[in-house]
Image (cartoon, rainbow, N blue to C red):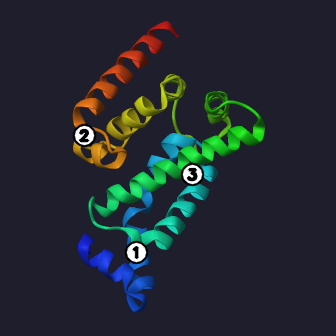
């Protein structure tokens, strides 16, 4: 595993950029894919957003200052790309972001890449009811198993605020699943 600082330096040197970018993609593609997939829910859409994420990382690597970890910076880009994707698709279909996400959850059963059972489907339906920030925090903490400090860096929010968001999300999910 290459050191992050070395990787960043190599990404900024034209002669090493292609090889460094290949290392970057191979190192982070799976974790970023699952973050994106937790937002867009669909495999093909997640692949498209992942590709856009890496394009954006490639084009903007010179702007990376190192104030946060490279992974956190890319995670933030991936999250924003996924949220923008949802907004764009909802706008194209003339529905709200929430309505579009409801449709995504309904389509999960038909997705050949969805490997969840009925319980997993119910959980996804419950997650879709959460406000955007709670949804992001819940997915990052529960599914990606990120530490609050990492989520704080990605979302630029205090650890205390994240803990409160996660707690509220869990309570809302419990309530939703009891009613359903």
Instruction: Name the quadrant containing residue 98.
Output: top right
**Left or right: 11 as drawn, with respect to 117:** left
Instruction: Name the quadrant containing residue 65.
Output: bottom left
Q: Could you say whether the residue bearing mark 2 is in a helix, strand or loop?
A: helix
Q: Residues within 10 Å of mark 3 (few under 14, many from 20)?
A: many
Label 2 vs 1, first from the N-terminus: 1
Q: Could you say whether the residue bearing mark 3 is in a helix, strand or loop?
A: helix
Which x, y percent locates residue 177? Answer: 46, 14
Which x, y percent locates residue 15? Answer: 41, 92
Is residue 31 shown to the viewer in this render? no
Is residue 8 shown to the viewer in this render? yes
Residue 148, labelled with which disc? 2
Residue located 26% across and 70% down the image: 4
Label 1 vs 3, first from the N-terminus: 3
Image quadrant holding the N terminus, namely bottom left
Instruction: Name the quadrant containing residue 52.
Output: bottom right
Residue 46, labelled with which disc? 3
- Determine the CA span between mark 1 and mark 3: 25 Å
Residue 62, labelled with which disc? 1
Whether 21 is drawn above or below 146: the answer is below
Label 2 vs 3, first from the N-terminus: 3
In front: 14, or 129? 14
Q: Could you say whether the residue bearing mark 1 is in a helix, strand or loop?
A: helix
Which x, y percent locates residue 124? Answer: 51, 29
Q: Nearer the viewer, mark 2 or mark 3?
A: 2
- Determine the CA span between mark 2 and mark 1: 27 Å
Q: Nearer the viewer, mark 1 or mark 3?
A: 1
Which x, y percent locates residue 148? Answer: 25, 40
Q: Residues within 10 Å of mark 1 (few under 14, many from 20)?
A: few
């Amino acid at each position: 595993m290459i050191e992050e600082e070395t990787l960043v330096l190599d990404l900024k040197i034209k002669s090493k950029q292609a090889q460094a970018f290949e290392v970057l993609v191979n190192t982070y593609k799976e974790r970023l894919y699952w973050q994106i997939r937790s937002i867009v829910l669909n495999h093909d859409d997640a692949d498209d957003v992942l590709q856009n994420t890496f394009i954006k990382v490639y084009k903007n690597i010179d702007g990376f200052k190192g104030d946060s970890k490279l992974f956190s910076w890319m995670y933030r880009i991936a999250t924003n790309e996924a949220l923008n994707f949802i907004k764009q698709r909802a706008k194209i279909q003339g529905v709200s972001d929430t309505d579009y996400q409801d449709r995504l959850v309904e389509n999960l059963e038909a997705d050949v890449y969805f490997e969840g059972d009925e319980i997993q489907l119910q959980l996804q339906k419950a997650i879709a009811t959460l406000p955007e920030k709670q949804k992001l925090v819940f997915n990052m903490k529960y599914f990606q198993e990120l530490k609050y400090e990492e989520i704080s860096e990605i979302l630029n929010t205090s650890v205390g605020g994240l803990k409160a968001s996660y707690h509220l999300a869990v309570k809302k999910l419990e309530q939703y699943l009891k009613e359903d």
